[in-house]
Image (cartoon, rainbow, N blue to C red):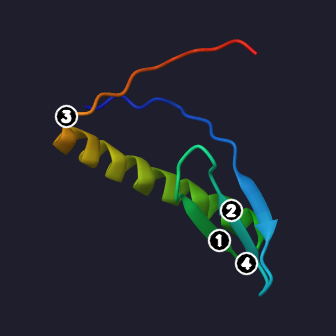
Amino acid sequence: MKRRNKLTYDVILEPAEEGGFTVYVPALRGCVSEGDTEEEALENIKDAIHTWLDAWEQIAKEKGTSLKKVEIAR
């Protein structure tokens, strides 16, 4: 069984001109979603983050790329 880490991302939530909300994750280039309400947009971005990370893991595996953790104090 694969161990799951709890990850936290900052997201930007913006009202969309046509109504509803657009939400994106600055740390994950291209990870964007939307929803009719703030709550729906925030739930939808969770699915988008999972999809983005799964795709990245597959691409990284194919390229032989490794993921390392770096911690900073600010």
Q: In the drawing, does residue 72 fall left or right of residue 37?
A: left
Q: In the drawing, does residue 5 fall left or right of residue 67?
A: right
Residue on which the image places disc 1: 34
Residue on which the image places disc 3: 64
Distance in Å between CA atoms under marks 2 and 4: 11 Å
Q: Are marks 1 and 4 in contact (CB under 8 Å)?
A: no
Q: In the rendered picture of this protein, how many numbered marks are placed on residues?
A: 4
- For the residue marked with disc 3, what is the amino acid? Gly
- The numbered mark at residue 36 is 4
State the SS at label 2. strand
Distance in Å between CA atoms under marks 4 and 3: 39 Å
Q: Are marks 2 and 1 in contact (CB under 8 Å)?
A: yes
Q: Are marks 3 and 1 in contact (CB under 8 Å)?
A: no
State the SS at label 1. strand
Distance in Å between CA atoms under marks 3 and 1: 33 Å
Q: Residues within 10 Å of mark 1 (few under 14, many from 20)?
A: many
Residue on which the image places disc 2: 23
For the point 77% across and 72% down, which residue is it?
37
- For the residue marked with disc 4, what is the amino acid? Asp
Q: In the drawing, does residue 41 fall left or right of residue 1?
A: right
Q: In this view of the protein, which residue sits in the foreground, 38 or 16?
A: 16
56 relative to 64, above or below? below
Q: Are marks 4 and 3 in contact (CB under 8 Å)?
A: no
Q: Nearer the viewer, mark 1 or mark 4?
A: 1
For the point 53% across and 48% down, which residue is it?
28
